[in-house]
Amino acid sequence: MTIPDTKSREPKQARSRQSFEKTIEAALSLLQERGSDDFTLAEVSSRSRVSIGSIYARFEGKDDLIRVAHGRKMEDIDAVSAHLFGELHVAEDAGLEERARVAVESAVRILRRYADILRPFMLRATQDEAISRRGAASHAALAQHFSELLHGGPGDSIRQDDIDWSFNVVYSVVARRLGLGSTIEGSGTGDWDETIEKLAGMVSSYLLARVDTLPRS
C-alpha cells in the first residue's frame, strides 16, 4: 500500500536503501520502547548508526519519518491479519456462536501482538491526520476480515451494520484493556480467555437477537 502524505525519498542504491531501512527500524524501535514519539532524530541517528545528514537527505524531519514508519508497520499488520484470517478453518455448517468465538479470538490476537507499537501511533493519530487516515484503513481491513468470518453460516441473514457495530464494540473493549489510545497505565487487567469468551458470547447473542427482529418472508 502507498504510504500517504509523506515526503520521504526512497533510495534505489543498495547501500543507501540499507541506511533508509535502518532509520525506519530505529524509529519503530524507539516508538515501541518509549510508548510515545518522545525521542529526537539524534537518538534515531545513534541507534541506526546513520548520520543526521543522511536522515535529512531522505526525510523532511521527524514527522515525516514517523509517517513512513507508521505506513510500513500498518502494511505489516495488514499482511499478518490477512494471513491469519485466511488460514482459519471454520466448518461451513459452523453456527454463529463458533464463528463469533473464532472472529473475536483472532482480532484479539492481532491487537495483542502489536499493542506496543499501536499505542504510540494511536496517541499520535489524535493530532496527525495522515496517521489517523492510514490507521483507519487498517482498522477497516481488520473489520472486513471479522465480518467475512461471521457471514456465510447456515441460514445467514445477519445485517452488515450489526456486524460492524459488534466489531467496533470488541475493538473498543480490547483497545481499552491494552491501553491503546492512552498510556499503558490506563489498560485493564484480567484473564484474556475469559474476555474472549465474554465478547464472543456478547457478539453471538446480539446478532442472533437482531436476526430475530427481521421481518419474516
Image: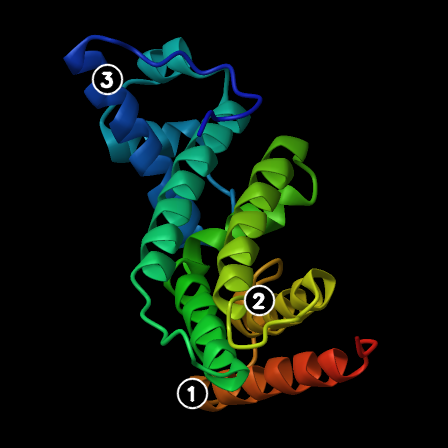
Query: Residue 28 placed where, x, y %?
Result: 37, 41
On-image quarter of the C terminus: bottom right
* Viewer can see residue 116: yes
| Res. 200 image quadrant | bottom right
Query: Residue 112 placed where, x, y %?
Result: 42, 67
Name which residue lies at 30% across and 36% down: 25
Instruction: Check the image and name the residue furthest to the front.
Output: 217
Q: Nearer the viewer, residue 84 or 5?
A: 84
Q: Amino acid at mark 2?
A: Ala
- Under circle 1, the secondary element is helix
Characterize the local packing of mark 3: few (<14), some (14-19) or many (20 or more) Cα atoms within 10 angstroms.
few
Dot in front, 1 or 2: 1
The label on residue 193 is 1
**Which residue carries the number 3 mark?**
17
Query: Residue 208 placed where, x, y %?
Result: 67, 84
Name which residue lies at 52% across and 85% down: 97
Residues at marks 2 and 3 touching, judged by CB atoms closer than 8 Å: no
